[in-house]
Amino acid sequence: MAINFYTMNDSNIFVFNNHTQTNASATGSVWVNGNALYNNYNVGKDLPLQTAHYYYALQVGGDMNITGGINYTQNTGLHDTTGVKTKYTMVNQNGVGNQPLPYSFGTVSIAAMISYLQCSSIAWAYYEPDKTTVSINNTSLTLTGLDPNINTFLIDGNNVAKSNKNISEITSINIVAPLNSTIIVSIYGNNITLNNITTLYNGAPITINNGKYILWNFPDADTLLINSDIYGSFLAPYATVNTNSVKVYGTILVKNLNGSLNAVNNLFIGNLPEIYNPSTSGTCTSFTTTSSTTTTTTTTTTTTSSSTTSSTTTVAPTNRDRAINDIIESVALEQTALSHIINAEGEKIQKAIINAKDNTELIKINESVESMVKAITRLESILQSKLEIIKCNDCT
């Protein structure tokens, strides 16, 4: 089972550092590790109404300076040790007073989450792009993949498909792939601009449901300017992202986010490959790109046809030992995630005991926790099966 965005799978927006927005919104939950500077910013419209103190549509770890706006359904949280309330006039429609409420990370490691997303972004960019093709016709880009499970595309933002065109000149992208297959589109380059791109899926206008399986990945961008609506989630772990009245239908995971962006809580449901384990892998492998698209672990070749220009990437083969290590690391990472979930359930019970109005609420919380424990038990049996696969006498 893929862990995708680690503990941020249910977040609409996760900003590693600072978040500045004016006349914008996120219909899901927003988590800002640094400072939040908002003017008329709305959050949580698509989330269920919750009055318990451990439900947050907005969480801020640093300075909170918020003027106006609405939190439609849940609480606003300010970190109990690092958070500072400079100004807060947002309206919380769940009826809970004394907003923002203090919260703590508990056992959740923000550093581990950020490390996972940074390193996975690099790894996902070079995950088997040799099995797909990227072709260009004038300013139209076609991404073709045949795998029913996952298709990955690697694009040079400064020289798209060896055409000498910048990604900012592209006006349409047609993704040709099996429905409901996971799509990773990785665009590398330090300064990336996306301008008014029309996105198609198998030749037809892309839908919100198509976007649930798409990740737009920017593994080494320092700055990213978005002037186009995006269907799908996007990951830019090293970038300051600037937006101008655009919509993103998916999960947003970036270093800094500025401008006016309306995020729709269209959460990613694909299956991203589990490559990097933050609990065992340490820092990311060094990442560099050249005109021939070469990294420390990847070799790229280029092929050209008479009608279109396409680039393909060849990935070094994975040997048996590496495959075994990957399985073990994936199990360890899932166990770490499960420990966070179990701890969160424990905190939920503790807070419910303090805040519950009557026994009915306690019973509902107990049923919820019991359901989660049963799900974890089922997953543990699956993890055990993973380990049984590699148990043999001649494995190193």
Image (tube, rainbow, N blue to C red):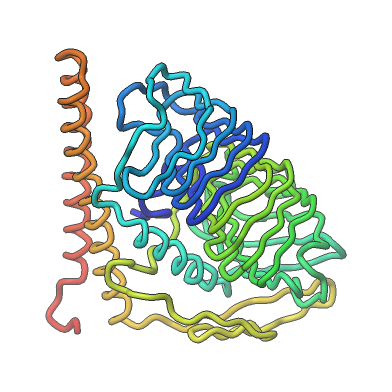
Tell me where residue 190 appears, x and y as whole percent.
66, 72
Check the image and report above or below for 302 versus 374: below
Tell me where residue 314 appears, x and y as whole percent.
56, 81
Check the image and report above or below for 26 versus 305: above
Q: Is residue 396 left or right of residue 216?
A: left
Q: Quadrant of residue 289?
A: bottom right
Q: Residue at x 58, y 52 (%)?
A: 178
Q: Farthest residue in the front direction?
A: 86
- Along the line of sight, which residue is nearer the eye, 393 or 43? 43
Tell me where residue 47 appears, x and y as whole percent.
46, 28
Q: Is residue 342 left or right of residue 111?
A: left
Check the image and report above or below for 58 versus 165: above
Q: Residue at x 18, y 51 (%)?
A: 380
Q: Farthest residue in the right direction?
A: 138
Q: Is residue 25 left or right of residue 118?
A: right
Tell me where residue 153 appears, x and y as whole percent.
61, 66
- The quadrant of the image that shows the C terminus is bottom left
Check the image and report above or below for 19 versus 225: above
